[in-house]
């Protein structure tokens, strides 16, 4: 496995934490883009990398979602003038990483009130807690220079997701939002 894939999740967490104030919210939620000193060259060729990592979670590790992500990436790459080629002829290799995590958000609201029971009433302060469970999806798209194996571009998206977010149209919008910084030919 290439070195740049090792600890991708840990690196993404650090990147998102550091870059969160600069992240933009659009269809892809919080997007962080990293570009190397050698940026992606407009009009270049690309191919799918022979490796990819995804969570074993069936919400993303299934043929339908994987195909939709691939179609969205291919559409976006073509829209930026990047041409698909055979892996040995491509300047860049592209891969993606997808995961979904269950999250819990707890909000507390301080309140002053009166509670009455069979033994009388008590006046005091306390808090009301609202607990929300949700799924948070992460999608990372990597562009690697084929000759050197060097990561030259990465976009990472993190957002709340539901079953409604896995339509082709929604995935297309997320990937388009993530790849808008790629050069156009």
Image: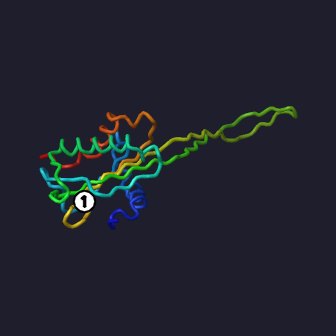
Q: How does the figure colour the protein chain or chains?
A: rainbow
What x and y, as percent, mark residue 73? Answer: 27, 45
Q: Residue furthest right?
A: 119
What x and y, as percent, mark residue 75? Answer: 23, 41
**On the rendered structure, is 158 left or right of 148?**
right
**On the rendered structure, is 38 left or right of 20?**
left
The residue shown at (18%, 62%) is 38
**On the rendered structure, is 137 left or right of 91?**
right
The residue shown at (40%, 47%) is 158
What x and y, as percent, mark residue 147? Answer: 19, 65
Q: How crowded is the residue under tag 1: few (<14 C-alpha within 10 Å), some, or many (20+)?
A: many
Depth check: 104 or 93 in front? 93
Depth check: 54 or 131 in front? 54
From the viewer's perspective, is residue 70 above or below residue 120?
A: below
Q: Which residue is mark 1?
A: 144
The residue shown at (36%, 45%) is 66
Quadrant for the N terminus, please. Answer: bottom left
From the viewer's perspective, is residue 132 above or below residue 32?
A: above
The residue shown at (14%, 45%) is 81
Provide the secondary structure element on which disc 1 rests: strand
Depth check: 146 or 165 in front? 146
How many numbered marks appear? 1
């Amino acid at each position: 496995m290439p070195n740049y894939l090792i600890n991708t999740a840990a690196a993404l967490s650090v990147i998102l934490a550091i870059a969160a104030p600069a992240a933009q919210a659009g269809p892809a939620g919080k997007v962080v883009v990293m570009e190397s000193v050698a940026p992606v060259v407009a009009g270049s060729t690309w191919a799918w990398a022979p490796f990819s990592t995804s969570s074993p979670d069936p919400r993303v590790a299934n043929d339908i979602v994987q195909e939709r992500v691939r179609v969205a990436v291919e559409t976006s790459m073509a829209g930026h003038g990047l041409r698909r080629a055979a892996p040995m002829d491509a300047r860049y290799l592209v891969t993606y990483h997808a995961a979904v995590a269950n999250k819990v958000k707890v909000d507390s609201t301080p309140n002053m009130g009166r509670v009455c029971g069979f033994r009388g009433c008590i006046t005091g302060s306390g808090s009301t807690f609202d607990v929300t469970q949700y799924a948070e999806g992460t999608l990372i798209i990597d562009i690697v220079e084929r000759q050197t194996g060097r990561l030259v571009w990465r976009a990472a998206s993190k957002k709340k997701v539901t079953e409604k977010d896995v339509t082709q149209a929604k995935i297309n919008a997320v990937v388009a939002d993530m790849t808008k910084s790629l050069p156009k030919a």
